[in-house]
Amino acid sequence: MVRTRFAPSPTGYLHIGGARTALFCWAYARRHGGRFVLRIEDTDQERSTQASVQAILDGLSWLGIDWDEGPYYQMQRLARYREAAERLLAEGKAYRCYCTREELDAMREAQVARGEKPRYDRRWRDSTETPPPGRPAVIRFKNPLDGAVTWDDLVKGPVTVANDELDDLVLLRADGVPTYNFGVVVDDLDMAMTHVIRGDDHVNNTPRQVNLYRALGGDVPHFAHVPMILGADGQRLSKRHGAVSVLQYRDEGFLPEALVNYLARLGWSHGDEEVFSRAQLVEWFDLEHVSRSPARWDPEKLRWLNGEYLKRIPAEQLLEGIRERNPAVHAEIVAAMDPVAMTAVGQGSWAVLGEHEAFLHALASPVTTDAAVIARHLDEKGRAVVGELAGELEGVTWTAEAVKAALQAYVKGRGLKMPEVMMPLRVAVTRQEKTKAIDAIVAALRKEVVLERLRHAAAG
């Protein structure tokens, strides 16, 4: 059975890169009827916080990335890491190192001065020296000294790294907390991971981990290293590109379905499909079509895609969202208009949820525009037009068809050009110079609201 995992460090929010990794792991497991495991790698005790853990859980839940097992926490598994390290010691595959921080720094400085690659020189690997009394020790791995590590990466293809490029990494620190590479391997073996899908910034860790899997007598999982995400400027994605918390996108009015769709297309494709459902993603997802090249983050494309999803949401659902977020604004909107009809007028023009709310609220409680617009359209002639329109519309049955017919009849009956009527009407009713079709807006507003605004404008 396919088993994948997402293993974030709770040192911050769930960002875009992490969310894409989680999505790929989740989709692969779902596609193959497998299990998706959530693991919290909280061994960085100085930076890990419960608030970050909650932000990660909330972000995954909002995106609909559900896990089958976990969350498991590494800090609750310290005894297991100690057991695995002691086993490697007993089998002669690891050793205790008593170097101080000062000794390690001096070692590396000397290597750099000689033009060598700075690394631990293995001085305690086969030492028979008596350990300094009272000095704490770390446990290091006896990395093979010759040969090479090779794996067939499911994204990058075959990768080979010579063992003499690798040093004897620390497995367990003196305080009993495992290093990243050791904790990951023990967890993956215990949790029977079959596929490790992660960012390609982890490629350098993989040969070290492969040697550890083998030393511990376990099966090496399949690896798939996904290229990083770049900003439009070609630099690594950061906050200035919009790489903020996933939950910030929620707060800015993006839909989880749209963000999932967009994240899936960041470095993976299914033909020319751009807009697809979560179910289609699960049906189609594979690692063969993950690009080997970095993906480009495009905020405008995300906005476009979100707009495509907004077009498909029933007006009632959109309005319920406003009611939940802002009951006072919702009450103003309902009092001034048929919100379902008004949503239909504007639907298709919004990129995020807040734009829908802003559109309705601006029509429910219009703000006086600048004096030049008023002077241009509600001069003496304009005021006369809207005054007459108030009388014409008073007896109209309030449907879109009847309102449109009455306005057309007024234009024709007075021998006026359409803008001579519609512009004063638009400014009087909406206080805006540019809107969607004004006849549709007028019909979606409540009759008494339109008549009151027209009479107010006519009075100057």
Image (cartoon, grey):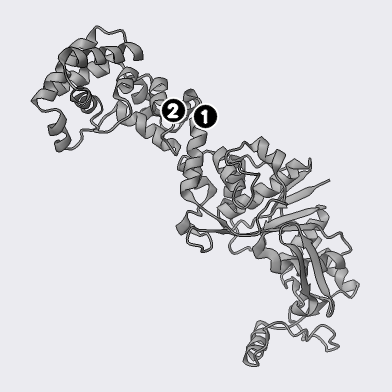
The part of the image, by quadrant, that contains residue 170 is bottom right
Q: Of helix, strand and loop, which one carries label 2? A: helix
- Residue at the extreme right of the image, as rendered: 91
* Left/right of residue 347 with respect to residue 203 in the rendered view: left
Q: Quadrant of the N terminus?
A: top right
Disc 1 crowd, CA 10 A, few/some/many (<14, 14-19, 20+): few
**96 is higher (above) or lower (below) than 332:** below
Eye-nearest disc, 2 or 1: 1
Q: Quadrant of the C terminus?
A: top left
**438 is higher (above) or lower (below) than 349:** above
Residue at 29% from the left image edge and 24% from the top image edge: 438
Residue 262 percent location from the top left of the image: 56, 45
Can residue 100 be seen at all in this image of the molecule? yes
Front position in the image: 254 or 297: 297
**253 is higher (above) or lower (below) than 100:** above
The dot on residue 323 is 2
Front position in the image: 129 or 228: 228
Q: Which residue type carries mark 1?
A: Arg
Residue at 45% from the left image edge and 36% from the top image edge: 353
Residue at image mark 1: 312
* Left/right of residue 144 with respect to residue 106 in the rendered view: right
Q: Which residue type carries mark 2?
A: Arg
* Left/right of residue 20 with respect to residue 207 in the rendered view: left
- Residue at the extreme bottom of the image, as rendered: 114
Residue 113 percent location from the top left of the image: 62, 92
Residue 80 percent location from the top left of the image: 81, 60
Q: Of helix, strand and loop, which one carries label 1? A: loop
Residue at 24% from the left image edge and 24% from the top image edge: 429
Front position in the image: 434 or 222: 434
